[in-house]
């Protein structure tokens, strides 16, 4: 295990670990802006809604005589049903009197249920090639191809660059959408761009972290970072660092200990950082508050 | 009157079945301070928001210096109501003021020392330089209001639209805001404020726009701020001792 953390357990494992770190950087940064926009639960629905897409894409690719586990193909399917889930969610919020949290719960459970039915059916096929699909639930680094890692890490870097370009617009819209509009920004476009970036990191993340837990890698780093700073930009940087470390650690442990899924390890690491931050962060932590700092 | 800084042209806003603003047409001149006055729910804030496109008007439009807002955005500064802002947001005072320079900064260019110095100048005009590095939520209501005025100043606009700038502020802030606004007026800018305290209207403002969903009257304070027109504006709600 320590070999893995020190990047000494072979080229492939090292690559996977670095890829997960790049993913964590992007996820943590995107999560900060989502947290500031108060949409923290939306990616949970989007992530669970990827599962039916993974199953459908697998079946389609096998039916076409191809390799069912081809990651770009699976992610394409995942993206389609995730967008469908987001569309249903928006429709429920706008077209009914359901509040957003209830709509999220409905979308999340229905799509997740459908996904599990599909994945169980695929498992029953015994097609031999289905091994690894269960990794989309809780995440796994087992059986990842080098091309998969390049896709995930490269995608993460693209997301980070997009965030760098959009940072000011994202902060202004999150702070006061009405004022942002008067200043010439279009809040609905900025929100759309943010959701596109969220979709991107969810898709990049489901293979490594798993659909169930990817939301933790989005939001926990942001919540931790908020305790350490009162500046939105600094918060995004800290959250990216925490996400990067958690991704790195999770992938390393998962690669070193066979059978340990990546997602739960990453979430456990994030939670440890959260506990530490809640305790010792200077102004917003427990100790800081007891010493008379403001909340 | 020369080209109006802001012309409301038959603006109507409806929220569901409720008409919040009913076909308001009026002109706001430059070089004057105009108070928008009316009872609660009269559509004062809504009229400003509709002109600025923050809420969509049912019909009508607003012209800024004779043009659509998109053509002259740089010249129009807006100070929203304090209640519209998330005060827990992780942002410092100086960064709020820099938001006012968004049009110059664009989305990509980093903030330079000169930008920061200019933002500090704006804070100095509202006596808030010492608070530049504080988180916005750590300020008092009056201090927050002054920061938002500094953000509007950072735009170097020719028209300032302020939504209840004096709501819930201390006497020191009140005086600071009035001084700054009067200086803007004397430099030739148009200043428009949604205002609640009738007693201070004649002292602070040059013109008044009386609104109760419909426009009741608009004009110089001496002619328009009369007991008769105020009674029309407020119906039975007007405390008589407040009439000038």
Image (cartoon, rainbow, N blue to C red):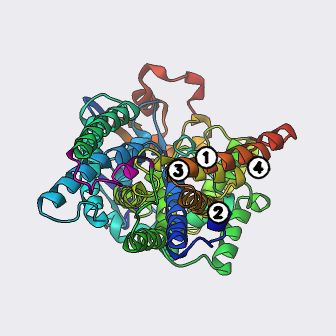
Q: Is residue A215 magenta?
A: no
CA separation in Å, label 4 and label 2: 15 Å
Count all numbered tags in the image, as a single digit.
Answer: 4
Question: Between tags 4 and 3, which lies in front?
Answer: 3
- The residue stretch that appears in magenta: A125-138
Q: What subunit carries mark 1?
A: A
- Of callouts 2 and 3, the N-terminal one: 2
Which residue is labeled 4 in the image? A281
Q: Residue at x 31, y 49 (%)?
A: A50
CA separation in Å, label 1 and label 2: 24 Å
Q: Is residue B52 left or right of residue A233?
A: left
| Res B90 seen here | yes
3 and 1 marks on the same chain: yes
Secondary structure at numbered mark 1? helix
**Disc 3 residue crowd, few under 14, some 14–19, many 20+, Cα 10 Å:** some
CA separation in Å, label 4 and label 3: 31 Å
Q: Position of residue A6 (x, y in %)?
A: 66, 70
Which residue is labeled 3 in the image? A260
- Of callouts 1 and 2, the N-terminal one: 2
Q: Say which mark, if any, is on residue A268.
A: 1
Residue A285 position (above or below residue A201) = above
- Of callouts 3 and 1, the N-terminal one: 3
Q: Say which mark, if any, is on residue A97.
A: none
């Amino acid at each position: 295990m320590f070999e893995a953390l020190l990047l000494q357990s072979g080229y492939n494992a090292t690559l996977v670990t670095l890829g997960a770190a790049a993913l964590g950087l992007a996820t943590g940064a995107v999560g900060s802006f989502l947290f500031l926009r108060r949409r923290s639960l939306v990616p949970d629905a989007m992530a669970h809604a990827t599962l039916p897409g993974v199953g459908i894409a697998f079946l389609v690719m096998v039916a076409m005589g191809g390799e069912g586990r081809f990651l770009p193909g699976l992610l394409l399917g995942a993206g389609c049903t995730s967008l469908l889930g987001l569309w249903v969610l928006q429709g429920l919020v706008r077209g009914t009197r359901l509040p957003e949290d209830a709509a999220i719960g409905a979308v999340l459970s229905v799509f997740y249920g459908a996904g599990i039915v599909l994945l169980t059916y695929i498992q029953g096929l015994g097609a031999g090639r289905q091994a690894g699909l269960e990794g989309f639930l809780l995440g796994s680094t087992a059986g990842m191809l080098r091309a998969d890692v390049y896709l995930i890490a490269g995608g993460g870097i693209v997301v980070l660059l997009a965030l760098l370009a959009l940072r000011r617009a994202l902060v202004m819209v999150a702070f006061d959408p009405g004022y942002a509009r008067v200043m010439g920004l279009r809040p609905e476009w900025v929100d759309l761009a943010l959701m596109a970036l969220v979709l991107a990191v969810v898709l990049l993340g489901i293979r490594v972290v798993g659909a169930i837990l990817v939301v933790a890698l989005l939001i926990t780093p942001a919540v931790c970072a908020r305790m350490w700073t009162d500046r939105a930009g600094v918060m995004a940087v800290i959250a990216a660092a925490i996400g990067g470390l958690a991704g790195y650690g999770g992938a390393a442990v998962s690669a070193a200990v066979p059978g340990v899924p990546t997602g739960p390890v990453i979430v456990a690491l994030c939670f440890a950082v959260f506990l530490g931050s809640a305790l010792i962060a200077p102004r917003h932590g427990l100790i800081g508050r007891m010493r008379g700092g403001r909340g | 009157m020369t080209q109006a800084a802001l012309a409301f042209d038959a603006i109507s806003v409806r929220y569901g079945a409720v008409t919040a603003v009913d076909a308001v047409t009026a002109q706001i001149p430059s070089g004057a301070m105009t108070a928008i006055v009316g009872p609660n729910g009269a559509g004062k804030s809504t009229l400003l928001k509709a002109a600025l496109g923050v809420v969509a008007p049912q019909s009508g439009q607003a012209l800024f210096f004779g043009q659509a807002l998109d053509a002259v955005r740089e010249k129009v500064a807006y100070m929203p109501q304090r209640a519209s802002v998330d005060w827990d947001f992780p942002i410092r005072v100086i960064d709020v003021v820099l938001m006012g320079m968004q049009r110059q900064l664009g989305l990509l260019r980093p903030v330079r020392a000169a930008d920061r110095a200019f933002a500090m100048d704006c804070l100095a005009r509202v006596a808030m330089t010492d608070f530049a590095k504080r988180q916005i939520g750590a300020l008092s209501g009056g201090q927050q209001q002054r920061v938002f005025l500094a953000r509007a100043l950072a735009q170097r606009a020719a028209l300032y639209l302020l939504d209840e700038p004096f709501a819930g502020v201390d006497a020191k802030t009140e005086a600071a805001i009035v001084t700054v606004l009067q200086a803007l007026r004397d430099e030739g800018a148009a200043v428009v404020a949604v205002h609640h305290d009738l007693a201070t209207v004649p002292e602070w403002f040059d013109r008044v726009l009386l609104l109760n969903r419909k426009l009741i009257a608009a004009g110089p304070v001496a002619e328009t701020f009369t007991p008769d027109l105020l009674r029309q504006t407020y119906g039975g709600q007007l405390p008589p001792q407040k009439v000038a």
